[in-house]
Amino acid sequence: MPMVTVLYFARLREVLGKSSESIALPASVRDLEGLRALLIARGGAWEQELAPGRPVRAAVNQAMAVGDVQIADGDEVAFFPPVTGG
């Protein structure tokens, strides 16, 4: 089974209670949106924080990414809230 490393930053790290984890990808998960759906299916804070419409950005291998970006064995996926400045 392919494995990816998932990183959580800022608010997500605090609410989800972890900064990273390794996740084995089921055969049905091939892209970023599929991974997000897999995490949302955990329910609770996962469902609330990663729900569609929530302001969460993502990067795959340190490059900004959107839902249909393919993910593969060994990839690093990061989720983080948008950064605002002032």
Image (spheres, rainbow, N blue to C red):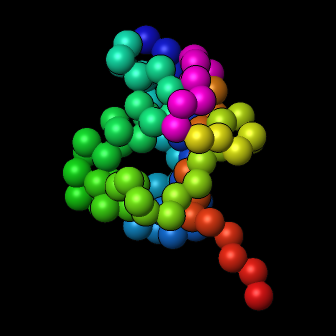
Q: Residue at x 68, y 70 (%)?
A: 83
Q: Residue at x 25, y 45 (%)?
A: 42
Q: Position of residue 60 (x, y in %)?
A: 66, 36
Q: Position of residue 62 (x, y in %)?
A: 74, 41
70 drawn magenta: yes
Q: Position of residue 23 (x, y in %)?
A: 44, 30
Q: Position of residue 14 (x, y in %)?
A: 47, 68
From the viewer's perspective, is residue 31 above or below residue 12?
above
Q: Quadrant of the N terminus?
A: top left
From the viewer's perspective, is residue 31 above or below residue 55?
above
4 drawn magenta: no
Quarter of image, res 34: top left
Q: Nearer the viewer, residue 56 or 43?
A: 56
Q: Quadrant of the C terminus?
A: bottom right
Q: Residue at x 37, y 13 (%)?
A: 27
The overriding secondary structure of the stretch rendered in magenta is loop
Q: Which residues are magenta?
A: 67-74
Q: Is residue 22 among the parts visible in the rendering?
A: no
